[in-house]
Image (tube, rainbow, N blue to C red):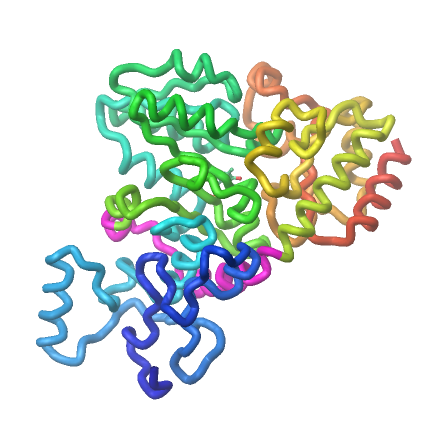
Amino acid sequence: MSSQSFNARAEQPPLNGQAAPEAQARPSLPGSTQSVHAGERRFRAHDSLTVPIVQTAVYTFDDTAALAGYYEERMFWEEPEREEYGRYGNPTVRAVEAKLAVLEGAQEAMLVSSGMAAVTATLLLMLASGDHMILADQCYHATLTFCEKVLKRYGVECTAVPCGDYAALEAAIRPNTKLIYAESPTNPFMRCLDYPRLVDIARRHQLKTVVDTTFATPLNLRALNLGVDVVIHSVTKYLAGHNDVMAGAVVGSYEMLTPLRQAQGMLGCIVDPHAAYLILRGLKTLGLRMERHNANGLAVARFLEEHPKVRRVWYPGLASHPDHAVATASMAGFSGVVTFEIDGDREQTYQFIDALRIPTVGPSLGGVESLISPLALMGYADLPQEERDALGISDQLVRLCTGIEETGDLLADLSQALAQI
Ligand SMILES: *Cc1c(COP(=O)(O)O)cnc(C)c1O
């Protein structure tokens, strides 16, 4: 490919998750290598090694014949090999999508403006008035509100069932049930799905399954390989990885993704090319980062479980976690999120948090910096006390999202802060 040609076609990464031959990630390659190379063409305009930020809203045509050819391709439902207008596609965004598809072992991935845009667009497109869906109840709060309150206005009924109760899940199925939605691992108790059971129930009743695997990433868990139909990510978290950009992704087969892809230009939930570049850059180190997040999560969980000032720890890598067996069967690592309860009162809990020197108080997770939150004050603060109690969110409950700092430094910091209460 000539470095002089600086048109959309030359810049064009593959549209469908199939990388150009020179960059095609072979399935045998580990995710950490794929995250560096997959989805990108090796030779680009100006011989740039990195995928350029194609900062444009408009793509031009050489002449009217080129324009006519473009529409002809689209009419026959072929993915055109170039872009036309920014809301329908961008080469920098396509490179992220192709990389994510390879990482998940999927045919197709769609990048959208946030994790919630991925959740809402997917559910709006997969459901119609008169349909019913089932939701595992320990899910992201905005997802729960969308399913129970917003979808209801459009005639979609939703039943929330207790996370991990497969009998309740099967009992909730009605003739008009269309899909099961779950997260794994969940926030904040890190509950993990028993995939063979979930997929067996869904297949026997001809239901689609949608799983938000934000807390796992494709390096720890490839849910599509386990039989799930659609995977959702908040790319804001581990995938982008640096607490500096917001995006979401929907990943699955052509069949599942095509209606979503076609609606994206209408819904408008697109990602800016510059944000796409930051995500692409973040993804290059996904393997290294997840190795450290997994190691930090496990070391911190083990340390806290042994500590006399900690009442209980929730981390799927611990034998004490209710889903340790199913998590071990499906996941390569358990990520960096550790939730625990301080053995003390509310004031002692806040004292401990304020005494920490490395983790900063803040929401979110998955970035290089460690973040800590007292959950009753963060994420659940707007709920009435009874609702918080029902969810198990006590005043002593703390969520530590370990970053990529040295494990020993984090343990020493936790140790000195716990010694102060
Ligand atoms: C953060 C998060 C979301 C929402 O993603 P945004 O990028 O913040 O919109 C959805 N699901 C899970 C599990 C999350 O952690």
Q: Does 110 lie within the magenta span?
A: no
The residue sitting at 48% across, 45% down in the picture is 234
The residue sitting at 58% across, 14% down in the picture is 386
Give the camera-side residue of 118 and 96: 96
Give the camera-side residue of 255 and 280: 255
Could you say where residue 255 lies in the image, as x and y percent from the top left? Answer: 26, 44
Could you say where residue 407 lies in the image, as x and y percent from the top left? Answer: 78, 49
For residue 22, above or below residue 255:
below
Could you say where residue 150 lies in the image, as x and y percent from the top left? Answer: 34, 28
Q: Is residue 149 visible?
A: no
The residue sitting at 55% across, 27% down in the picture is 382
Q: Main secondary structure of the magenta part?
A: helix
Give the camera-side residue of 181 and 384: 181
- Segment tinted magenta in the rendering: 262-287
For residue 120, above or below residue 175:
below
- Outermost residue, right direction? 419
For residue 58, above or below residue 203:
below
Q: Is residue 141 left or right of residue 397?
A: left
